[in-house]
Amino acid sequence: MASERPGILVIRGGAIGDFILTLPALAALRTQFPQARLTVLGYPHIAQLAVAGGLADEVRPIEARGLAGFFNPRATPPAELADFFAGFDIIVSYLYDPDAVFQQSVRRCTRATFIAGRHRPDETQTRHATDVFLKPLERLAIFEGDPVPRLRLAASAATPPSSRPRLAVHPGSGSERKNWPESRWAELLKHLADRTDLELLLAGGEAEGDRLQRLARLWPADRLTLAQSLPLPELARRLAGCAVFAGHDSGITHLAAALGLAGVALWGDSSEAIWRPRSDRIRLLRHAQGLAALPVREVALALADLLAGTEGAQPRQAAPGVSLDETKV
C-alpha cells in the first residue's frame, strides 16, 4: 500500500443483516491497517452504521450513476468512477459477479489489490456467514479476525437511563414467513404490560407500520417509545439503551446482537448454522411444527429469564412481576 494514507474500499450491497454480518471483515481490515482510509461502497442508509461504529470513514452510494457499466464487458466505464476506483490500494468486493465482469472492469481502472468475496454463503454448507465473509481476507494475511459482529454506540438521548429495564421488540422482518403471528405478539405484550413495569421500545419500518400501531395500543403510553422508520444509526442508538430484545430472523435482530443486547430470536426455517446471530447472548426459539406454533409461554419464560439476568449487570432494577412462576399465558 504505497500512498501516503492507504485507501481500502469494501463494496457491499445486500440487506441490513447481510451488512451486519460483514462487520467482522470491516473490523479486521481496520485492525490490520489502522492508518488506512476505509470507504464502504454500499447503501448509505445501511452502511452508515459502520461509520457510526468507527469501522469505516465514509460511505459512497452503490447506486452511483454509471456503476452498471462495470458489469458490461463492452462498456467504457465513466471517467469519474474509474478515477474513484484508482484511488484505492485494496478493493474487497462482496458483489454478485459470477463471471468476474465487474472485477475485470475495475482492474482496468486501478492497480489496487482486488479481492472477490462471496455475496452470500453457500446454503449447502454449514459455515457461518461471518466466517464466509472473513475468508477472502486471508489474502491480506488476516487469518484470525474476530467473527462476532460488534457495534459500539452510545445510547440515544431518546432512550435515557431508567430505573426500569427497557425491552425492545421488533415484530417484523423481510418476509412474512419469518414472522411470528401478530396475535401471538399481542398476547405476549398484553401479558407483559399487565404483569411488569417494563418500558417498551417498539421498533419497525414502513412495512410494519400498521402492525406497530395496533401493538402499541396494548402498552401503557407512559412506558412506551415508538421507534418507527428511524434512520438505522438512530435506531441502533435507541436499541443500545435497552436491556433485552425480542425479534425474528431479521436484520434488526442481527443489529441488536451486534450491540451486545441479550435477547430472543424467534426462528423459522433459515439455516441456524449459517445465519443465526453470532452472539451467545441471543437465544434462538424454534418449534418443530413451524414458527406459528411457538407458544407465547415459551417466549415469555425466556424473556423473564433474560430480564432476571439484567439485575446487577445493568444500572436498573429487575422488572417486578416477571418471574418464571408467574408467567402463565
Image: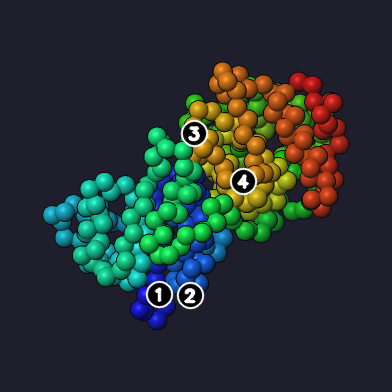
Quote the CA–CA distance across marks 2 and 1.
7 Å
Q: The disc labelled 2 sits on which kind of residue? A: Gln
**Residue 40 visible to an observer of this rendering:** yes
Q: Position of residue 131 (x, y in %)?
A: 47, 49
Foreground label between 3 and 1: 3
The answer to whether mark 2 and mark 1 are in CB contact below 8 A is: yes
Quote the CA–CA distance across marks 1 and 4.
32 Å
Binning the other alpha carbons within 10 Å of mark 1 as few (below 14), some (14 to 19) or many (20 upward) gives some
In the depicted structure, whether residue 135 falls above or below residue 281: below
Name the residue located 53 percent from the left edge and 52 percent from the top edge: 147
First in sequence: mark 4 or mark 3? Answer: 3
First in sequence: mark 2 or mark 1? Answer: 1
Kindly identify which numbered label has been placed on residue 6.
Answer: 1
Report which residue position mark 4 lands on: 279
Q: The disc labelled 4 sits on which kind of residue? A: Ser
Foreground label between 4 and 2: 4
Q: Regarding mark 4 in the picture, which secondary structure is present there?
A: loop
Q: Position of residue 325 (x, y in %)?
A: 84, 26
The answer to whether mark 3 and mark 2 are in CB contact below 8 A is: no
First in sequence: mark 4 or mark 2? Answer: 2
Binning the other alpha carbons within 10 Å of mark 2 as few (below 14), some (14 to 19) or many (20 upward) gives few
Q: Position of residue 132 (x, y in %)?
A: 43, 48
In the depicted structure, whether residue 210 falls above or below residue 329: below
